[in-house]
Image (spheres, grey):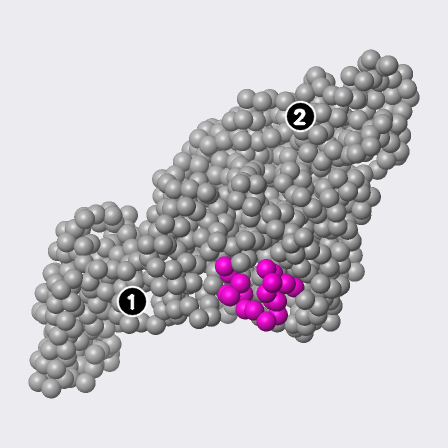
Amino acid sequence: MTSPLIRVDNLSFRYEGSERWALSNVRFDVNEGEVLGIFGRSEAGKTTLCMCMNGLIPHDLEGDLQGSVEVAGQNTKRTEPQDLATIVGIIFQEPESQFIMTAVEDEIAFGMENIGLPPNEIEERLRLVLKLTKLEQYRRKPPRRLSGGQKQRVAIASALALRPKILIMDEPTSELDPIGKNEVLAIAKELNREHNITIILVEHETELAADIIDRGIVLSEGRVKFQGTPSELFGNVELLNREGIFLPEVTEVGYGLSKHGFPITQLPFTFQQGSALLQSLLTKDRNPV
Amino acid sequence: MAYDFYVARQTVLHKLSPPTKVVFLLSTSLLALEVQDPRVNALLLVGLLLGALSLRIPWRVSSIFFRSGLIVGIALSISWLFFSKVGEPLYRLWDGIYIYDLAIPLTLSMLFRLWTLLTSTLIFVAITQESEFIAGLRKLKVPYALCLTFALVLRFMPLLIEEYNQIREAQMARALELEKIPLLERMKHFMAIIVPWLVISLKRVSTLSAAIDSRGFKITGRPRTFFHEPDVSLADWFLILGLVGLFAAVFALRTWMGYFVIVPGRL
Amino acid sequence: MMEQPQIIVRGLHFRFPDGTEALRGMDLDIRKGEFLAIIGQNGCGKTTLVKQFNGLLRPTEGSVLVEGVDTKKATIAQLSRTVGYVFQNPDHQIFSTTVFDEIAFGLRNLNFPQTDISDRVKRAMASMRLEGKEKDNPLFLSKGERQRVAVASILAMSPRVLVLDEPTTGQDWSSIVTLMNLVQKLNQESEQTVIVITHNMHVVARWARRVVVMTEGRIILDASPAETFTNTQVLTRAFISAPQATRLASELGFGTGILTVHQLVDRILQTRSPKAAQSRKGQSCRRQWSVHLDA
C-alpha cells in the first residue's frame, strides 16, 4: 500500500499576533490521483489550510504551527515554499493578482526560469502546457486582453510548467462568469483524469465541484467537521445546511422526495444521477409491480 | 509597454537590441539635461522628432505626450521666464517684476529639454516591449530582483490606476463631490479614496509575493536562467559605447571647458 | 391609471472614449417595487447599463430618465439620492474606522443634520442585521458583514432604487442567502426597487421576479425567470445554464414554471398522488423538510 501523497497530521495553526486558532487538529490524507474538495463558510480556514500545504505557511506567513504537513515526503515546516514549487502548485482566487508578467509566455516561463531550466526546455514545456490549457493562440497576449477564465488558465499553465504532482486550487472560479467557471473546472478534471494530477479544490460552487471530487472535507471554524466520499458528504444534508454550504439542487430534490416516502437510498449529487433517479422513480411509480 | 504604447513595426529602431534601447533612452535624456544652449537643445529635439515621425506612431499614443508637453511646457515656461533672475534686467513688466536677458534663452533651453525628454520617452515606449525593457536592464547588469520590481511596477500601474477610479466612482455614488469641498477640508475626504486603495494594494502585494514564492523564486541551489536572451550584436555594442561616449564627451566639454552653457552654476 | 416607470431608458447607446461600443441601443422600463436581475456574460454591458442610472456614465445617444429626471441634466450626487449603487467589492469603498461612520458617509456628504443621520444609520443597520456593531471596525468584519455594511451605507441615503452589482461574487452561500433575504424584505415591505447583476442563477431563480438578459450590448430577453430559464435559444446565446431543478423539470416534461427545488418536489408529488398533494400544498410541504436557510 503506497503512502499518501499529502499527510496532514493533527495540524493546528495560529497567525502571528492572533489569539484565535485558524486551524485546530486538522487531520486527513490525500492519495495520489485524488481530487479532494474542501468546503465551508468564508473564514472557516480553507485558504489557511491551502497555504499550509505548500509551505507558504509557516515560511511566508508566520505564526504558530503545530502538528505537521507532509507533502510527497517533505515536511513543510522544514521546506521553503520555493523548494516545494516543483511538487505543489497553487492557484489563487483573484486572477489579476497572481499574473506577474505582461505576456502569457513570460508568465508561464517565469517559474521555469526560477528553477533554472535551459531555454530550449522552457520552450518545450511552454508549448505543452499551452496545449493542455488550450491557450496556444494567446501566447504573446498581455493579461488585459484576457478574460477571467483565460487568466486563471494561465495561472494553471504557469503552475503546471513546473510539473507538480499536486495542484491546489483555492476558489479558482469565484470571480469568473459561468463560462470561465466551466473552463477552469473542465481543465482541472482533465488534468486529474488524464494526467493523474492530484487536486485540492476549494469551492463554493458545490454543483460544479460535485462533478469532479473523489473525496470531500467540510471545514468549520478551523476544524474538520466531516470527511468522506461525495455520497456521504452530500448525503449529510443537515451538516451542509448548518455550515451554510450550497446543496446541489438534485440532492435537495432527492432529499425532499425521500422525506415524502419515496424510496431513495442514496441522494444524487450530479445532474446525471438526479436525472436518472427521477426517471426511474417516476416510471416505477406509473407501473407498480 | 504599460499603456499599450508599443507600436508593432519592423523599423531599424525596433531592431536594436534591448540594452541598446535602454541606453538610448538614458543617454538622450541625460544629454538633453547636460546641454544648456537652446540651439544645441533644438538640434537634439529636432533629430528626435524626426526619429519619432519615422516610426509613424498612431496619434492616440503620441497625443498623450504632445498634450502633456504643451500644457506642462507652457506652465513651466511662464515660471522660468518671469522668475529666473539671470543676467541683466531687460524688460520691466510691473513694479519689481522684470524679465532678465538670459531668462529668454534659458527658458527656451528648458522648454526644448522638456520636449526632448518626452520625445525620447515616446520613441522608447513605441519601440520597446515590456519584456524587452526588463531583458535590456538585465543585460546591462542590473540585478534581477530590481528588474523584477520594475516589471511589477509596469504590470500593475494600469491596474492600480483603474482601481483608483473604481474606488472614486464608488464614493461618488455616495455623493462624494471633491470639487465642491474647500481645499483645506479636501484631505479628509480624500482619505475615502486613498484608504481603500491602500488596503486593496496591500492585499495584492501579499498575494503577489505568495504567487512569486510558490513559483520557485529563489529556489535553493538552482541558479536562475532566462528564457529571453536578447541578441546583442557588435553594432549594438558600438552604438551603446558611442552613446555613452557622446554623453561623456559633452559632460567633459561642459564641466571643464564651459561649452554649452549660458548661465554657469545652474542646470 | 398606471404610474410612470421609475426608470425609463430610450434608444440608449453608449460608446467609451476609446471607441468601444458598449451599449448598442436599448429600451427599458423599470417600475417601482420591481425585483429585477440583469444577467449575461462578462463584457456584455451589464455594469455599463446600470452605471447610466446613477449618472456615473451618460448616454452617447438616447436618454435615461430617473423618476422623470434626465440623467444628462443631473449630477451624480443628485442621482445618488434616487439610485443607490452598491459596488461589487465592499473593500472598494470601506475606509472608516467605525461601522457608524462608514454608513454615515453618504449622509454627511449630502449635509444631513446630525439627528437625521443617527436615525437613518440605525435604521439601515437594522435592515441589514448589523445591530450592535456601530463601534466595530469594518475592516475586521467578515466578508459577508462588510458587504452588508456597504449595502447599509447606501440604504441610509434611502434611494428608491437599489442596485447591487454582483453581490454574489466571492461570497459564500449563507452570506448570499442572508443578504438576498434582507433585500427581499425591503422590497416586499417598503416597495424598494431592486436591481441585481449576478452570475448566480440560483439567486435569479429564487429571488428575482424579472430577468433582463444581455449580450454584446443588447437586451435579448426581458421576461420572468421561468420564461428565461426555459428559453434554450437565449440561454445558449448568453452562455447561461438554468438551475438544476428547472432542467430536471424540463427533462421530465413538466413545462415552464418550475424554478426551485420546492416547486419541483411539489410537482412530482402531484403526479404521484394528485389528491394528496393538493392537501399538502405550499407551506406544509415546506415545514416537513426545511433545507433553506432562514432569513
User: Around disc 1, counting alpha carbons within 10 Å, would you say few (fewer than 14), some (14 to 19), or many (20 or more)?
Assistant: many
Give x and y (percent) for residue C44.
49, 35
Q: Disc 1 sits on a residue from what chain?
A: B
Q: Which mark is residue B137?
A: 1
**Does C140 lie within the magenta span?**
no
On residue C30, the disc is none
Location of residue C47 with respect to A103 vertically, above or below:
above
Subunit of label 2: C
Q: Is residue C103 visible?
A: no
Residues A288 and C252: in front is A288
Q: Is residue B232 above or below residue B170?
A: below
- Answer with left or right where residue B198 lies relative to residue B93: right
| Residue depicted at x 26% and y 56% | B128
Q: Quadrant of residue C97?
A: bottom right
> Disc 2 marks which residue?
C247
**Is C50 placed above or below C175 here?**
above
The residue stretch that appears in magenta: A69-86
Image-based side of B185 in relation to B149, left or right: right
Q: Secondary structure at mark 1?
A: helix
Instruction: Tell me: B239 left or right of A154.
Output: left
